[in-house]
Image (spheres, coloured by chain):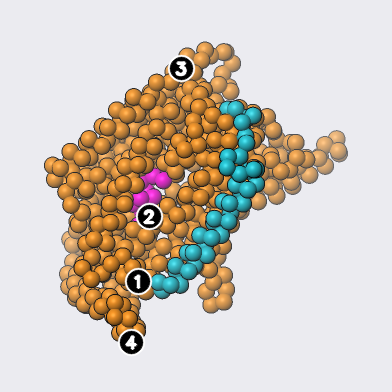
Amino acid sequence: MNTDDDKAPLFKSWKQWYFLVIAFLVLLIFLFNYFTKYFS
Amino acid sequence: MNYLDWIVLILTLTGIIAYGLYKSRTTHNLAGYFLANRSMSWGLILLSIIGTQASSITFLSAPGQAYTDGMRFVQYYFGQPIAAVVICIVFVPIFSKLQVYTSYQYLETRFDVKTRTLTSFLFLLNRSLSTGISVFAPSIILSSLLGWNIYWTNIFMGGLLIIYTMSGGAKAVAYTQQLQLIIIFIGIFLAAYLVVHMLPEHVGFFDALHVSGKLGKLNVITTGIQNGKFNWKDQYNLLSGIIGGFFLGLSYFGTDQSQVGRYLTASSMKESRMGLLMNGMVKVPMQFLILLVGALVFTFYQFNGAPLFFNESQLAKIEGTIYKDSLVQARQEYETINLLKRKSVTDFSLALHQHDQINITRHQRELEDLQHYSDSLRMKVKTWIKATGGDNNDTNYIFIRFVVDYLPAGLVGLLIAIIFLASWGSIAAALNSLSSATMVDFHRRFTKHTITPEKEYQWSKWYTLAWGIFCITVAMFTYNIGNSLIEAVNVLGSLFYGVILGVFLVAFFLKSIKSGLAVFWGAVVAECLVLAVFTFAKLGYINLGFLWLNPIGAFGVILFTLLFNLFFRVQRSRR
């Protein structure tokens, strides 16, 4: 495995990717909560 | 199944085997066989990670779980994106730098051979048993439903994939998983479309969701708080999903060779990280959609009358017992409830269209009462089945029973092929990882004479075959695991994952711990603690959901390692 090629694609750093993944999870939880309440 | 179903089934399965064999060409050494010469892109890794985790159990059990318990099971996956981030930061750079074949190799560099061997052994134990269940789970369902011989079904379910897994190793596994997942998603999408399409004309997708939601099946987010207190026994809620799911995810994706082996095939660290992060983002919505199919099937049965018990073969067994007359009466009562439900749910959906709030509330209450009544009848039948020694859990039969009873010819064959393909994807990855751990952590590590790369390659192929036979043998002896099969595999995983994770956490974060002896005994005692807690919970002495076993195991290893380390230091200073 090539350890030199570790530049994050699309973003400047991997930190921004990590933030995106966690933010997406938080967004999903909010949407699911709305979904649960809306249909119950 | 008619002849068209058989043609679709046989063509799909032979197509996958042929494709696997076509992709089997690889270099005759361990890097080629176990790591596909570290050449994979993140897209392939993503599909391989999904294909390894999502077995047929996922596609059979999850819709049934939504039907019986609602969609809250999705919360179990909430910890996985967080785990993916931690693995990208901590685990991937170390595994990449050391160029390991198995994650356990790192533990020898960090501690000693004892610790590496113990964790690799725990992995082999857990993975081989759970793979046995993964073979048995879909086989028992298909054999009960279609009258197939269970032993032959086990052999086809766990045996045919060995052909391409043995010859092509990690490369064949990854490429077949890619094709398998495409077929699986097409099939599931078609099934979901047909569920809605087969509802009465005036009932659309959103109406179906309203029916399901009003009857408590769209409970995606639950807090686990009952009567003002947090219920520790509650299996799936936001807190247990995030915390318990995080530890389970960290252990599964960070230390289980069946998953580590997938992203070790990456051409670079960037590809490994992208595969893991994308999986973190895709997994929760994917699981949500699979569960949604189950919630839609629930609505479908409100209009079409659900069976009293979805595994008809179990009902047939109690017909020859003292419960025979009671069963006849229960069937009649259930039929009456189904008729009332049909009328009530039709009126309810019409009231929804007319925004008639009074009738919406009235029919919702009616439906709730009828649901309560039908649930109590089902419960009675389950008690009779249990009393006569049968399997009283029909969760895994719900979706496939719907497929066989209602889907058109050809599609039934495709859905059954999907069950095989989903199984093959995860079993193939498991066999590849079992073989790599056996070869690298045991055979190569403890053999005194040098083995040529060609010989190592040949041995690895034979280990793949041997583990395949072992898993089929486990499947032959598995019987009546009780709970939902998806849960059985997760419970088994939780017994070992926490401890394995704990060892890695000590290795990564407690730099002051240098003693392999302290970690080894810390892991042994923590494993005993996990098994004891599980036994007490099973016997009803404590209230605890199985997901909590993961943090208990992980923190147990950390705590006992610190204690043993202190003990050994005091002993040394006394000498």
Give the drawing colour for chain A.
cyan
Residue holding disc 2: B290
* Label 1 or label 3, whichever comes before in sequence order: 3
* C-alpha span from label 2 to label 1: 18 Å
Question: Which range of residues does the magenta coloring cover?
Answer: B54-64
Respond whether the residues carrying marks 4 and 3 are from the same subunit: yes
Q: Which residue, as the protein is rendered here, is positioned at the far bottom?
A: B358
Residue tagged by mark 1? Answer: B210
User: Mark number for residue B28?
Assistant: 3
Write the residue at 56% across / 62% down.
Answer: B239
Give the x, y percent position of residue B400.
27, 53
Q: CA distance from mark 1 to mark 4?
A: 16 Å
Real-space Cα distance between discs 1 and 3?
57 Å
Q: Which residue is mark 4?
A: B358
Identify residue type, mark 4: Ile
Q: Is residue B64 visible?
A: no
Chain of the residue where label 2 is placed in the rendered structure: B
Helix, strand or loop status at disc 2: helix
